[in-house]
Image (spheres, grey):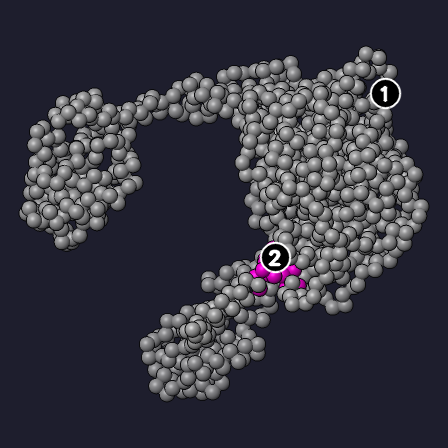
């Protein structure tokens, strides 16, 4: 019979469990929702519209791989056929397509009402010689907040460009919505696109002559192989990662580190068009229609990555296709309107990681105080081109304000002409305040009072009785008045609480203590905290209130921000300057923006030339390489601790080469052409050839991500110096050689040590008048027992031992241990030995160190112990160590070295590995290897690290399929017409194809110095969008995407 009463507790528990499971299932995504958690709580329990479009059936392959976008097991690339032999059969897209769980939202703004019907050009506009039309700006329709905005919230400092988030299933998606601006730009203050007749920009490309038929055939064969390499990777993306951000080319899975909107899909659109893959292009455009930029699994949008991959990809595809695919522009506008919310800050500097969810986006914010330079300065080209196409000046205004701030600051940094890698973009400078008393911290101010303050009713009593000021009540009254003076009425109730918690009594009023009253509120609080015992106790709330410094005094009010432009991050003692990672595209975009605006904005030229001069003066160096006739250049990383004067040349330069810096060759070449800087063309050649050398130097023929080199003292003459290279590989070699005799002596010679004795077993007889059972415990060395000095003091007699082992004090003998006491001590000693695992691991075989312990009081012991010959019943007398210099346990290597030098015949016998009398083998002692010479050290390091000659350290051995080096090679060919660059480019392509080709595409590799590098199962979007595009254009006709017509 079921009895409800008996099981009611279990039923209640079951109901609670089911309810909790349901609750957390529904709200499971709120933690990942971040700033929109409050919005989710508001909507909890309300009806939510379900997606309108039905899901698409998935193949078994995708069902198995769902939710496993990251391959944890790295495997080597699988051999595939040569790309020249591969066909172009395309696998089915349906097999890789993710289910569509969200209806495509309508465009935020009607295209016809925004752009009209004549905005789309009939052909690709000339980027370099574009004549912007007159801009008419519509009034800003954003709602202006009437009341002053709340204090902006600083943006979190933990943003990451690449951050993969696995989208939760079964949870309603949160969508971005337009929010009223907190810091809108008045319509009259919007910076307009420059107007007027564009300037004539000098020709960039070399004047090529007609090629021979044989040269044309060879060139087209190479271009076709490159095109097949592209198609192979693109088909792998179509079949395994369609509409995802990235393909994992070995496992066939996918990654979504950039919001999951299909970064590879969007970023590759223009390359598809250039390679005349029109069917693939149109298929990709259809997929772009389904992208929903208003939602993402990420809580933030990485502004820089989103602009260069998505917004740039859409605008470039719209331009290259002649403006015939309007959906590309519509999606670009949809995305740009979302990103514009990142610029809604007091100084209009963007939040580089935009928290887009409505609950967070609706709050006022500031930009970071430590922004990566490239993330702030690499937005101009994409937003400017979008403004030109749409005739919406607000897009240009957003980036023009950033440029203006960079221009103001450029000549006032610690390295004039260049900007540091980290920038304070908050626009908020808080003035420092000096402390008022020794108790006050600069950030916590409070008023100071040198005279005691009394309540009004106590002033008369104080006048009649001066001792009133000295009592506990006076201290209490003093603290109360300090609080009241600070609060100015804001904490009257709190002061009353203090009075109620500590009521006044006649006894206290007439008490007399110290005649000195506290001098400040902080001192009063300290006095209250240390009241005499006869004072009434205060409540915890009142005591906490006394301790807390609260004031409306002007000195203690939170100071508002002093407006400032871009600046160095606060509390920065030194800064780094470079043109590589974290800075690259900021400088690259300066000449590109100049061309895009038709030369109508002269500040871009001035800023570029100032940056170029700063780079040449402070960052460029010639690395020492074996080929002395090959003059190459690298751009290093400078560290500056203080502002450099114009005449000061000394800079702390890190002589590194990085793949990201390889774009500089193309930048200097373009700048040399359009700004008539003829000498810069030679610099462009040497910078680009420096990257080519780095490709040729490794075992794979691929340049590492980063490495260190040796700068030549003379840039004109730089002979190869093998000795100098070895010194750089072993910077401490000279010191090691000088200290070699001392180190060897320290290792091989020392005072006579207690030899290591075989462990004793139960039943062995020893002389307990000279030692205790603790000395027989293996591993109980100096760290287990501390010895006192033999001199007498007040703490005890000479020779007393203080043991920290687990042996109890009752087990310590006074003179000797009886057999019964021995049996009692032995189990405890064994327990202590078993617990000393860290010591046992440092010992060898059966060799266990005997730990000396104190003898009986009044007796002396010798300094060395002899190894017993036959019976294990005696030990020698160890020296007593001073308590001020506790015994230090030696490592096993040191023990062995001491044993190898011991004079005892038995010890020497042990060292040779002979057998004990009972026939058991005795272990051979360890002898440390000799200290290596410089030649041996260098040879080993070159072999172990596979260092090419000229590199002192490969700090980053990966190759991530980056495009910077081939981009500069392509630009150098187009600007010089020298076949040298095509030859080098082809060798680079063959090396990359050989080592990166994988099952479904190309994979990044872990170490370019290895002959068989491990694949990383990663294929970033720029492999298809940029790297293969530049390889393809290198072997195309010069008029295909001419540098005089397009800005790449």
Which residue in the protein does label 2 denote? 29
Classified by dominant secondary structure, the portion drawn in magenta counts as helix
Which residue in the protein does label 1 denote? 207
Q: Earlier in the sequence, mark 1 or mark 2?
A: 2
Quarter occupied by residue 225: top right
Q: Secondary structure at mark 1?
A: loop
Residue 799, percent from left and from top: 12, 46
Residue 379, percent from left and from top: 74, 43
| Front residue of this view, candidates 781 and 469 | 781
Residue 1007 within the segment the image draws in magenta: no
Crowdedness of circle 2 by 10 Å Cα count: few (<14), some, many (20+)?
A: many
Residue 34 within the segment the image draws in magenta: yes
Residue depicted at 83% across the width and 48% down the height: 330
Query: In the rendered view of the protein, which quadrant contains the C terminus?
Result: top right
- The residue range painted magenta reads 23-39
Query: In the rendered view of the protein, which quadrant contains the N terminus?
Result: bottom left
Q: How far apart are the alpha carbons under marks 1 and 2? A: 60 Å
Residue depicted at 26% across the width and 34% down the height: 843
Q: Secondary structure at mark 2?
A: loop
Q: Residue furthest front?
A: 1
Residue 460, percent from left and from top: 45, 87
């Amino acid at each position: 019979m079921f009895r409800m009463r008996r099981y009611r507790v279990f039923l209640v528990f079951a109901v609670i469990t089911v309810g909790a499971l349901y609750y957390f299932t529904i709200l499971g995504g709120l933690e990942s929702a971040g700033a929109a958690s409050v919005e989710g709580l508001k909507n909890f329990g309300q009806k939510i519209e379900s997606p309108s479009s039905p899901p698409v059936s998935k193949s078994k392959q995708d069902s198995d791989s769902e939710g496993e976008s990251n391959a944890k097991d790295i495997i080597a690339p699988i051999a595939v056929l040569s790309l020249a032999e591969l066909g172009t059969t395309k696998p089915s897209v349906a097999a890789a397509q993710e289910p569509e769980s969200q209806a495509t939202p309508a465009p935020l703004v009607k295209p016809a009402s925004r752009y009209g019907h004549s905005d789309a050009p009939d052909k690709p506009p000339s980027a370099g010689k574009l004549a912007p039309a007159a801009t008419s700006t519509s009034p800003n329709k954003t709602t202006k907040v009437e009341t002053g905005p709340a204090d902006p919230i600083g943006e979190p400092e933990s943003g990451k460009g690449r951050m993969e988030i696995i989208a939760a299933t079964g949870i309603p998606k949160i969508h971005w919505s337009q929010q009223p601006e907190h810091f809108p730009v008045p319509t009259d203050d919007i910076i307009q696109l420059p107007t007027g007749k564009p300037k004539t920009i000098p020709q960039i490309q070399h004047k090529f002559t007609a090629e021979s038929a044989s040269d044309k055939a060879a060139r087209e064969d190479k271009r076709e192989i490159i095109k097949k390499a592209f198609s192979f990777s693109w088909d792998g993306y179509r079949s395994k990662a369609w509409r995802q951000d990235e393909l994992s080319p070995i496992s066939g899975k996918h990654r979504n580190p950039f919001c999951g909107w299909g970064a590879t899909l969007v970023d590759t659109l223009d390359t598809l068009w250039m390679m005349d893959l029109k069917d693939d292009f149109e298929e990709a455009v259809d997929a772009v229609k389904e992208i929903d930029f208003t939602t993402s699994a990420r809580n933030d949008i990485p502004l820089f990555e989103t602009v260069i991959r998505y917004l740039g990809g859409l605008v470039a595809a719209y331009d290259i296709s002649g403006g015939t695919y309007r959906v590309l522009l519509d999606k670009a506008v949809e995305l740009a309107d979302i990103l514009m919310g990142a610029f809604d800050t007091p100084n209009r500097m963007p939040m580089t990681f935009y928290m887009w969810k409505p609950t967070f986006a609706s709050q006022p914010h500031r930009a970071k105080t430590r922004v990566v330079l490239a993330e702030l300065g690499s937005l101009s080209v994409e937003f400017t081109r979008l403004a030109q196409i749409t005739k919406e000046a607000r897009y240009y205004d957003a980036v023009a304000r950033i440029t203006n701030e960079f221009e103001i600051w450029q000549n006032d940094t610690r390295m004039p002409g260049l900007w540091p890698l980290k920038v304070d973009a908050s626009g908020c400078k808080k003035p420092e305040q000096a402390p008022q008393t020794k108790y006050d911290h600069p950030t916590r101010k409070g008023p100071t009072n040198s005279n005691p303050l009394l309540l009004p009713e106590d002033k008369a009593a104080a006048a009649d009785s001066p001792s009133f000021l000295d009592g506990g009540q006076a201290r209490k009254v003093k603290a109360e008045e300090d609080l009241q003076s600070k609060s100015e009425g804001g904490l009257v109730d709190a002061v009353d609480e203090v009075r109620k918690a500590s009521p006044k009594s006649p006894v206290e009023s007439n008490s007399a203590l110290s005649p000195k009253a506290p001098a400040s509120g902080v001192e009063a609080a300290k006095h209250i905290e240390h009241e005499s015992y006869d004072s009434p106790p205060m409540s915890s709330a009142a005591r906490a209130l006394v301790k807390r410094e609260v004031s409306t005094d002007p000195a203690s009010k939170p100071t508002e921000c002093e407006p400032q432009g871009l600046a160095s991050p606060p509390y920065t003692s030194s800064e780094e300057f470079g043109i590589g990672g974290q800075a690259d595209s900021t400088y690259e975009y300066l000449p590109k923006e100049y061309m895009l605006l038709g030369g109508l904005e002269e500040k871009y030229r001035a800023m570029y030339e100032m940056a170029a001069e700063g780079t040449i003066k402070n960052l460029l160096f010639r690395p020492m390489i074996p080929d002395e006739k090959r003059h190459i250049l690298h751009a290093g990383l400078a560290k500056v601790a203080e502002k450099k004067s114009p005449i000061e040349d000394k800079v702390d330069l890190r002589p590194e080469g990085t793949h990201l810096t390889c774009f500089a060759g193309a930048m200097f070449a373009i700048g040399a052409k359009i700004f008539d800087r003829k000498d810069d063309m030679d610099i462009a050649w040497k910078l680009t050839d420096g990257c080519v050398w780095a490709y040729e130097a490794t075992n794979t023929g691929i340049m590492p991500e980063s490495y260190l080199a040796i700068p030549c003292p003379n840039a004109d003459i730089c002979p190869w110096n093998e000795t100098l290279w070895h010194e750089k590989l072993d910077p401490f070699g000279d010191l090691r050689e000088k200290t070699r005799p001392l180190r060897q002596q320290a290792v091989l010679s020392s005072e006579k040590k207690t030899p290591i004795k075989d462990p004793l077993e139960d039943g062995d007889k020893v002389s307990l008048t000279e030692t205790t059972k603790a000395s027989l415990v293996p591993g109980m060395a100096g760290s287990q027992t501390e010895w006192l000095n033999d001199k007498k003091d007040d703490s005890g007699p000479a020779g007393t031992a203080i043991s920290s082992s687990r042996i109890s004090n009752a087990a310590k003998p006074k003179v000797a241990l009886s057999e019964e006491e021995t049996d009692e001590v032995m189990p405890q000693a064994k327990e202590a030995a078993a617990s000393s695992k860290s010591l046992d691991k440092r010992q060898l075989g059966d060799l266990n160190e005997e730990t000396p312990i104190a003898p009986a009081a009044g007796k002396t012991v010798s300094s060395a112990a002899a190894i017993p010959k036959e019976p294990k019943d005696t030990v020698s007398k160890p020296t007593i160590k001073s308590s001020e210099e506790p015994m230090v346990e030696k490592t096993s290597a040191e023990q062995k070295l001491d044993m190898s030098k011991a004079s005892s015949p038995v010890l020497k016998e042990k060292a040779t590995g002979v057998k004990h009398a009972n026939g058991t083998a005795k272990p051979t002692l360890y002898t440390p290897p000799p200290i290596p010479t410089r030649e041996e050290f260098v040879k080993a390091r070159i072999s172990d690290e596979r260092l090419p000659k000229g590199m002192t350290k490969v700090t980053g051995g990966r190759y991530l399929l980056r495009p910077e080096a081939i981009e500069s090679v392509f630009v150098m060919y187009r600007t010089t017409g020298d076949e040298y660059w095509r030859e080098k480019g082809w060798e680079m392509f063959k090396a990359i194809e050989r080592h990166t080709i994988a099952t479904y595409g190309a994979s990044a590799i872990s170490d370019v110095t290895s002959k068989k590098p491990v694949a990383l199962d990663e294929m970033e979007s720029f492999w298809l969008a940029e790297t293969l595009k530049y390889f393809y254009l290198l072997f195309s006709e010069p008029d295909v995407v001419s540098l005089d017509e397009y800005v790449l």
